[in-house]
Amino acid sequence: MSADFTLDDVRQVHAQIRNQIVHTPVLRCHPASGIAQSGHNAASVTLKLELMQIGGSFKIRGALAVLAGYSDAQIANGLTAVSAGNHAIAVAFAAKSRGVSAKLVMLQRSNPARVAACKHYGAEVIQVEDVHKAFDLVHEIERTEGRIFVHPYEGRGTAMGTATLVVELIEQNPAIDTVIVPIGGGGLAAGVSTAVKMMRPNAVVYGVEPFGADSMYRSFEKGSPQGIDKVATIADSLGAPSAQPYSFGLCRDSIDEIVRVDDDELKRAMRLLFQDAKLAVEPAGAAATAALCGPLKDRLKGRNAGVIVCGANIDPATYWSYLNA
């Protein structure tokens, strides 16, 4: 499917939300750095530091973009969302900023730091055992309580919100000709890849999924949105149960290739980001770097690669357990 929004639309959304978000910095890695060397001497590696965004991940961009389309009266009954954590944090923050309540459905395995962050912003949190039950419950809450459901990765508003990241990235480094973006449900990848192709039509976009949560990879293979039975990866915030039509369509049109990484590669990338860039990230936040160091390491020589570091919501004990594994 062709995008049903333009670059001007994305710029307009960016103007609407820019005073509510962080214009996240980039880190241009020296060619001699471990990160650049891991990409087999890529001409340039630029990290887009969305871990420094409000709520600790890129998710606030999509949440605020979606809510920009609703009046105060329309959201008076509050918001609801389903999430392993990062999207829930974003919706909790967005609800507080609009002066309404949030009732969030999270997984029992959600990282404690993410649950605490949601409660810090005043949200009510309900935890369930698996992602399919979580989606069933959030739709029941939407129906019975009249809350607005903010989808974690599907829809035009979400895609335009995540696309604002690229507007910043290209301004920060106009030479970028390759972008590596993590894929969970596809909301980030849909917006990022579409905006990249709008701004740099000849650029190459790689999507990255973990083995154990590769619904978009399977969808590309089958040519239609596919699901998975369960999530089996440490990158739980990339663990969407299925691809959805809108984000799948945008990803299919603008992502050149999806590569997969395993948990060991994610842990190695987490260590590299800590050692070389002094960044403490969650597994999902290391996914694009894991692809740079792993399946893409022989393919980026001479490229100017933008690497999306998407989040850092993890508690210290879990973080250190992964670094020391």
Image (cartoon, rainbow, N blue to C red):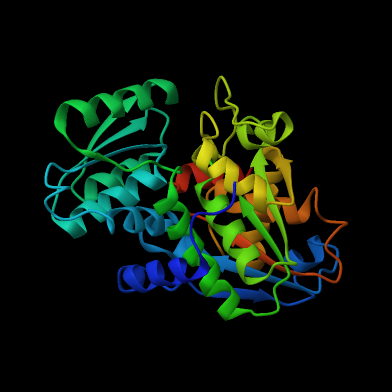
Number of numbered discs on residues? 0
Question: Left of 277 or right of it: where is 100?
Answer: left
Q: Is residue 8 above or below residue 79?
A: below
Pick the residue in front: 38 or 214. Answer: 214
Q: Is residue 270 visible?
A: no
The spot of residue 27 in percent (x, y) is: 60, 74
The spot of residue 21 in percent (x, y) is: 35, 68
Pick the residue in front: 70 or 288. Answer: 70
Q: Is residue 280 visible?
A: yes
Q: Is residue 146 above or below residue 122?
A: above
Pick the residue in front: 185 or 27. Answer: 185
Question: Left of 146 or right of it: where is 277?
Answer: right
The spot of residue 114 in percent (x, y) is: 36, 44
The spot of residue 59 in percent (x, y) is: 42, 53
Q: Residue at x 30, y 24 (%)?
A: 137
Q: Quadrant of residue 106?
A: top left
Q: Is residue 294 above or below residue 230?
A: below
Q: Residue at x 51, y 34 (%)?
A: 240
Question: Left of 238 or right of it: where is 71?
Answer: left
| Rendered-image quadrant of the C terminus | top right
